[in-house]
Image (cartoon, rainbow, N blue to C red):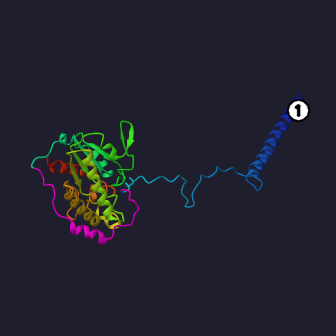
Amino acid sequence: MVNYRKRRRRDWLFGKAAVCVCLALGTVVAMNLFFGSFGSGGSVSVPPASHADSSGGAFSPSSPNSSRPTISSEKSSAKPAVSSSTVSSVQSAAESGKEPETENEKPESWFDDAAFVGNSRTEGLRDYDGLGDASYFASKGLMVNTVYTERTIRENGKKMTVMQALQKKKFKKVYLMFGVNELGWSTFHIFVDDYGKIVDDIREYQPGVKIYLQAILPVTAKKSDSSQVYTNSKIASYNKAIQKLAKEKKATYLAVNEAVADSTGALPAEATVDGVHLNWEYCGKWCKYLRTHTNS
């Protein structure tokens, strides 16, 4: 019995010693594994850094400018500017005479049998839509020579020139506006001659028609000062020539420029987004001038 107890005690001591040895060995192995992973032979995985530009900021595609682009001005024919001597000769020959303001403003329906011919500025007047059922024969860049050559008008599914389109319907009134695209022409008298031919041909197409020649609208002072072509002094010279042409052709000259110009004769900055084309408000001023300057 004694020997049995001694043997059990001895076995218990050996078992306990074995457990301690195992725990010690386990601790040593764990420490070797832990420190070994951060030693010279180990490595740590790092997530890849995001792409960055040279300035250190996060890379992103460049975004377009969100500001509204200015509308390009009317196309020029890329001809040299008019000489001052040529313009001066026309100025001295021009005579005064404007359509007087009528007592009563004409209703929109008064323009139902009218045709308006011109460039992108006339397109703006059309879009304003304040002249009844008037017909419009207008396109960007239209000039006194291209009305005969460029098929910019579509009638009944067929493309044709402005002068061809003007023969398709009877009109009692025709309003013309040319000149801003021709400001860069080198030969000034060609503009006047071509303009006069248009008046003559319309009278042939439309017997008894009343023809109105509208002044060229001004540009802003900023536009005028920064351009060698689109200047208000040159526009004023052209307008005098147009006024003289109207008198010679027995047409009516309309100084529509006065309806939109400021005290200096320039287009106000608030009237336009690009220095040339009228905004909604100023198209309304132009429209009102037409309705108050008519002769039946």
Please tell me whether mark 1 sits on a helix, a strand or a loop. helix
Magenta-tinted stretch: 74-102
Residue 140 position (above or below residue 266)? above
**Whole-percent x, y for residue 221 in the image:** 29, 64
In terms of depth relative to the viewer, which is nearer, 177 or 205? 205
In terms of depth relative to the viewer, which is nearer, 82 or 201? 201
Q: Is residue 48 left or right of residue 137?
A: right
**Whole-percent x, y for residue 124 in the image:** 30, 48
Q: Quadrant of the N terminus?
A: top right
Q: Which residue is mark 1?
A: 7
Magenta span main SS: loop
In terms of depth relative to the viewer, which is nearer, 268 or 103? 103
Residue type for callout 1: Arg
**Whole-percent x, y for residue 150 in the image:** 39, 49
The residue sitting at the bottom extreme is 85
The residue sitting at the left extreme is 103
**Residue 95 drawn in magenta:** yes
Q: Which quadrant of the structure image shows residue 83?
A: bottom left
Residue at 55% in and 61% down: 55
Residue 159 position (above or below residue 237)? above
The residue sitting at the right extreme is 3
In terms of depth relative to the viewer, which is nearer, 54 or 77? 77
**Whole-percent x, y for residue 166 in the image:** 30, 44
The residue sitting at the top extreme is 1
Q: Which quadrant of the structure image shows residue 264?
A: bottom left
Report the number of discs: 1
Is the residue marked by circle 1 packed among few (<14), some (14-19), or many (20+) residues within 10 Å? few
**Residue 264 drawn in magenta:** no
Q: Which quadrant of the structure image shows residue 245?
A: bottom left
